[in-house]
Structures are given as C-alpha cells and as structure tokens.
Image (tube, rainbow, N blue to C red):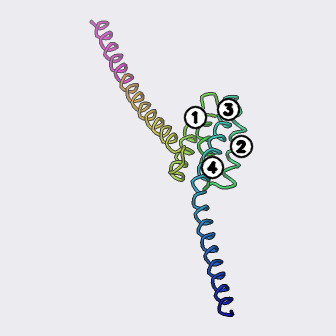
Amino acid sequence: SRTRVGHKSARTGTYILFYFTVSFIVAGLSILACAPVQDKITALRAHQQLEQYRESMADGFFETIIEQSEQVLEENETEPPADVALYVLGEVYAHPDFAGRDYALSHYYFEWLVENFPDSNLTSEAKTYLKLFETIAEREKEVAAATREKKATAATREKEVTAATREKEVA
C-alpha cells in the first residue's frame, strides 16, 4: 500500500511539473503573441495623435503644436511617439500658413525622423518631403542661374546699344 501512495505522490508531482511547464510555455507564447498587437496599438495611437495635430494645424495652433512636440522630444527623443513629434514639427515648419515657416528647420526634423526612426510609418512621408525640398532647391539653383544669364545678356545688349548710339552721335 505504501508503494501505491508513493506512486501516486510521484505521479502527482509529475502532473504538477507538467502543468507548470505547459502553463509557462502558454504564458510565453501569449507574451510573444501580444507583441504584434502591442505594435498595432502603438501605431493606432500614433495615427490618432497625428490626426489631432493636423486638426490643430488646420485651426492655426502652430505654436501650441510646436510646444507639445518639443515637450515629447524632451521626454524621450529615441522612442515613439518621438517619431510623430518630429514629423509634426517638420510639417509645421513647412506649412504655408505658419508665419514662422522655416524650410531648413522642417528639413532638419524630417531628416532626424528618417535617420532615427527608419521603421516608423511616417518615414516614407518624411522622405517625400525631403525629396520635395531637394527638388525645390535644384529648381531654385536653375532659376538663379537663368536669371544671372539673362542679366548678363541684358548688360551686354545695353553696352552694345550704348556703343552703337555713341557711334551714331560721333558720325
């Protein structure tokens, strides 16, 4: 009879160990399964925050948005929602209705976002802004070169006309 009790005790210990192991594995898998869900929740929060910022921008609350975004960056500039804050700062400083518009500062914030948050959903949009800034800068250089060329041509013509007028006066 004692062997049976010992056998039951050993079997009970085995079951406890089995259930503990299974529970541990299930808990581990649950945590791993929650990671994608947590990522989706973070992305949803970032999207909602971005929409709130855009509504505030549409209402002209640029200074408030700048203050809030800078506060986010002061708290933690390497983890989300810092990516949203950087993106919003880039948008605010490029916004045509913002009196303090500063394309260089906008470029700075978008570049910071792209370099430090390559996996952010906002990186693609930030790259679009950066490419746009690059295209505008190239176009401005072309326009400046064409303007210099026109001025040089106009100056040369003016000299030719002046010289021709003097020749007629002398003759």
Which secondary structure dominates the residues rendered in magenta?
helix
* Residue 87 in picture, x, y percent from top left: 59, 42
Q: Which mark is residue 94?
A: 1
Q: Residue at x 63, y 45 (%)?
A: 46
Magenta-drawn stretch contains 64? no
**For the residues bearing labels 4 and 2, Cβ distance under 8 angstroms:** no
**For the residues bearing labels 2 and 3, Cβ distance under 8 angstroms:** no
Furthest-left residue in view?
171
Q: In the image, what residue type sits under mark 2?
A: Glu
Determine whether the residue tagged by mark 1 lies in a helix, strand or loop: helix
Determine whether the residue tagged by mark 3 lies in a helix, strand or loop: helix
Disc with the residue nearer the chain's start (2 vs 3): 3
Find disc 4 in the rendering and name its residue.
42
Spatial CA span between label 1 and label 3: 16 Å
Disc with the residue nearer the chain's start (3 vs 4): 4
Magenta-drawn stretch contains 162? yes
Mark 2 vs mark 3: in front: 3
Which contiguous range is marked in magenta? 151-171
Q: In the image, what residue type sits under mark 3?
A: Glu
Dot 1 alpha-carbon crowd within 10 angstroms: few under 14, some 14 to 19, many 20 or more? many
Find disc 2 in the rendering and name its residue.
67
Mark 3 vs mark 4: in front: 4
Spatial CA span between label 1 and label 2: 16 Å
**The N terminus lies in quadrant:** bottom right
